[in-house]
Image: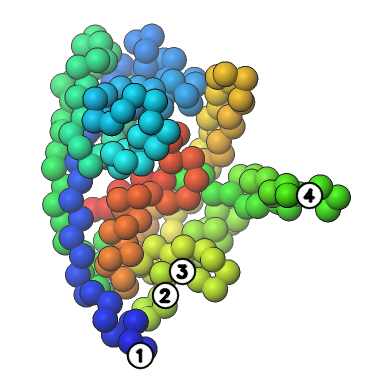
């Protein structure tokens, strides 16, 4: 074992806040959030006014705001989970939009190497396509994976076996845990989109469920706090554990 691995902490503490919002999908504000990704982002961020300067471009990341949601169309119910470093204030959402009062929970958990935890995450799994050969200084464009098998490969690349470094040789950032790839549950979710300000947004999404075995607690806590993958401003990347 090299010195980097031998000094790796065997435990790491994760402290955050979870707001669980149960909303009526028929309410105009909620209905608009469901059909427009930018409106959902605004709904989430409405709970955190005043913590940073208005217009700050990295306000979401400063406050550690991540979110995920699920909808039951038959019951017209939307459950929105918002994670943040600071407590959310949901008084700006109309009271009529709630089916129950918001539940704000302080999460304080220590993860240990070798511990097995259940997890769920909704991610925007993408691959990079190179720019045109003739173009100069043009970055590759990202496109979303569209099949469960490709999503599984995307996630497995980010698993971190015991003794492996947090960043792979190809630059992929790992998650501080490993998993049985065959036991992962993958479900493709509907694409969400927005056409705000002339900049169309289309975000492919997939849900991943399963169990993780912790190998690097500090790296795992970093992923739990910061999120996984792209489109974190649009309710992707939050990893929930139990």
From the image, which quarter does the N terminus lie in?
bottom left
Residue at 23%, 53% (x, y): give it. Answer: 242
* Classed neighbour count for the residue bearing mark 1: other residues with Cα under 10 Å, few (<14), some (14–19), many (≥20): few
In the rendered image, which residue does mark 3 sit on? Answer: 167
Q: CA distance from mark 2 to mark 4?
A: 33 Å
Q: CA distance from mark 3 to mark 4?
A: 28 Å
The nearer-to-camera label among 2 and 4 is 4
Q: Of label 2 and label 4, which has the lower sequence position?
A: 4
In the rendered image, which residue does mark 1 sit on? Answer: 1
Q: CA distance from mark 4 to mark 1?
A: 44 Å
Residue at 19%, 70% (x, y): give it. Answer: 11
Residue at 31%, 71% (x, y): give it. Answer: 216
Is disc 1 placed on a helix, strand or loop? loop
Proximity of marks 2 and 3: CB atoms separated by less than 8 Å: yes
Q: Is residue 105 above or below residue 51?
A: below
In the rendered image, which residue does mark 4 sit on? Answer: 136
Proximity of marks 1 and 3: CB atoms separated by less than 8 Å: no
Residue 93 can be seen in this image: yes
């Amino acid at each position: 074992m090299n010195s980097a691995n031998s000094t790796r902490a065997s435990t790491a503490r994760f402290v955050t806040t979870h707001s669980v919002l149960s909303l009526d999908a028929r309410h105009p504000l909620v209905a608009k959030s469901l059909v427009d990704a930018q409106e959902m982002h605004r709904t989430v961020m409405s709970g955190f006014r005043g913590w940073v300067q208005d217009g700050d471009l990295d306000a979401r990341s400063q406050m550690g705001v991540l979110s995920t949601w699920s909808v039951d169309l038959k019951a017209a119910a939307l459950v929105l989970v918002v994670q943040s470093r600071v407590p959310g204030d949901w008084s700006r959402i109309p009271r009529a939009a709630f089916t129950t009062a918001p539940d704000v929970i302080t999460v304080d958990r220590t993860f240990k190497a070798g511990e097995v935890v259940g997890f769920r995450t909704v991610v925007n799994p993408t691959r990079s396509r190179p720019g045109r050969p003739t173009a100069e200084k043009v970055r590759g464009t990202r496109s979303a994976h569209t099949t469960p098998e490709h999503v599984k490969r995307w996630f497995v690349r980010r698993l971190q076996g015991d003794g492996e470094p947090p960043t792979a040789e190809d630059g992929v950032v790992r998650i501080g845990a490993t998993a049985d790839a065959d036991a992962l549950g993958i479900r493709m979710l509907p694409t969400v989109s927005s056409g705000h300000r002339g900049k169309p947004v289309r975000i492919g999404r997939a849900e991943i469920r399963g169990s993780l075995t912790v190998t690097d607690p500090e790296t795992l806590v970093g992923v739990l706090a910061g999120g996984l993958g792209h489109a974190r401003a649009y309710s992707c990347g939050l990893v929930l554990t139990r």
